[in-house]
């Protein structure tokens, strides 16, 4: 190997270490409560400026963590969407929203921090925009939302927006709660990520199909 | 007034100022990201140890903020529960979970920080226990959950637990999102807290009544 290749490989290893350390710290303490210096230290970097050198600002670091997970989630959702036929119903599309996330979490093995990381990021208005960008850039999710919307054409626009926000909150925080319970060895209502997704899909389908009260 | 009364009144004013400053800072930045010193400064206290003097630890401060809101919410829920007859259905009981919170937020006028404060507290495992304590100490909420459970006797225990967690997450984060949008002048799906509660109740009733998928 050339000297340049060795240096590039070392940088790659360092970047992965920083991403893993940052994800864990952000998940457990919140993004704002953790400094780049703490991340560098937790990643075993003698140089406390390692985060700045490898990622730039904390916003860039958060985006890099989000993107690392977005890719495998996207691949799972592409496969699921491709398997759906023309008769796909509300439940099929809701499954395409939920299962790529839970399947990815199951694939990571235990413990994971990603679900709590997302919950922390979503609670911060400035950082949430990063997740929104990542969400918008997912072709498979756009496809899913379009297919879903075709199944419920009569839903009023404001209720669609409202329930869309609720669905996102439910997926994010239900996964974060389950991940935290697993990490702490606390009891969970369901044995596996697959079964937890089934419970979440049941609830979301019920929510989306609920009658809309019209008040005077 | 005696000197003692004047001192007690002044301490009461200082406590209220600290509670208000802490609630706002915690809501906007997260509880762990804000120091007691920053709270003291934002409350206009020359003495940076004012939080410690008046409240003790940060945990005590968080509990005091939670309790300040728990009382008016409890009064609204007591009234709502008292108005329900023997024929109360799932929707009536779900309304007793949601409307006391949204009515309290509407009563506070704009801007409010309480909903975002709760969302931040709920994202932290150690602090969440404080909210759980407050929730458990509410007689009207216990009454509501009992009445609700009587309406859905056939729901499997693990699904009841799972949907209870989901309902709580939905109420907390939907209120926090709406409060943030109002504070930022961003558009909201519904015009008023009352209408937002109606949308939330529709969604929660749909979620609770959703069929349960039994997997082999």
Image (cartoon, coloured by chain):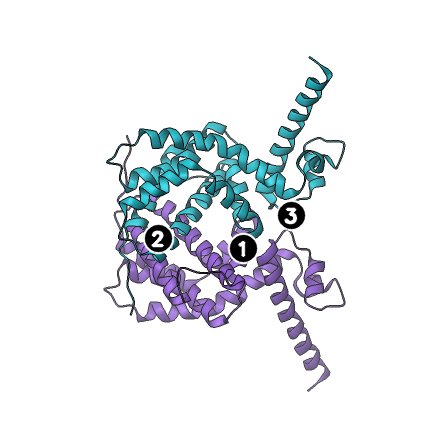
Chain colours: A purple, B cyan
Which comes sooner in the sequence, label 3 or label 2?
3
**Image marks 1 and 2: residues in contact by CB distance under 8 Å:** no
Q: Are marks 1 and 2 on the same chain?
A: no
Image quarter of residue B174: top left
Q: Is residue A177 left or right of residue A150?
A: right
Q: Which residue is rendered at x = 28% and y = 64% of the image?
A: B214
Instruction: Calculate the distance from the C-alpha at mark 1 to the C-alpha at mark 2.
Output: 34 Å
Q: Is residue B30 left or right of residue B96?
A: right
Residue to which mark 2 is pinned: B160
The residue at which mark 3 appears reads as: B33
Is residue B203 shown above or below A14? above
Q: Secondary structure at mark 1?
A: helix
Front residue (pair B207, A158): B207
* Residue hosting label 1: A130
Q: Tell me the distance, in whole angstroms, between the alpha carbons under discs 3 and 2.
A: 34 Å
Q: Can you give x and y, in whole percent of width and height, for residue B105 in the image?
A: 47, 33
Q: Which x, y percent locates residue A82?
A: 33, 70
The reply to whether residue A145 is in sight is no
Q: Nearer the viewer, mark 1 or mark 2?
A: 2
* Disc 1/disc 3 C-alpha distance (Å): 20 Å
Identify the chain of the residue marked 1, using the numbered disc in the image.
A
3 or 2: mark nearer the eye: 2
């Amino acid at each position: 190997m050339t000297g340049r290749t060795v240096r590039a490989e070392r940088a790659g290893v360092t970047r992965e270490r920083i991403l893993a350390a940052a994800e864990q710290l952000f998940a457990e303490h919140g993004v704002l409560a953790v400094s780049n210096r703490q991340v560098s230290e937790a990643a075993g970097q003698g140089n406390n400026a390692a985060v700045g050198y490898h990622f730039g600002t904390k916003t860039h670091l958060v985006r890099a963590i989000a993107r690392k997970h977005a890719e495998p989630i996207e691949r799972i959702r592409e496969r699921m969407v491709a398997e759906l036929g023309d008769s796909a119903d509300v439940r099929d599309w809701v499954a395409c929203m939920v299962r790529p996330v839970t399947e990815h979490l199951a694939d990571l093995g235990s413990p994971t921090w990603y679900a709590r990381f997302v919950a922390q990021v979503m609670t911060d208005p400035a950082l949430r925009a990063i997740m929104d960008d990542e969400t918008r850039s997912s072709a498979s999710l756009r496809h899913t939302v379009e297919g879903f919307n075709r199944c419920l054409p009569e839903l009023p626009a404001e209720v669609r927006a409202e329930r869309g926000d609720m669905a996102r909150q439910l997926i994010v925080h239900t996964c974060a709660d389950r991940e935290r319970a697993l990490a702490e060895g606390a009891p969970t209502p369901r044995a596996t990520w697959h079964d937890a997704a089934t419970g979440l899909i049941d609830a979301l389908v019920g929510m989306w199909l609920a009658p809309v009260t019209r008040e005077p």
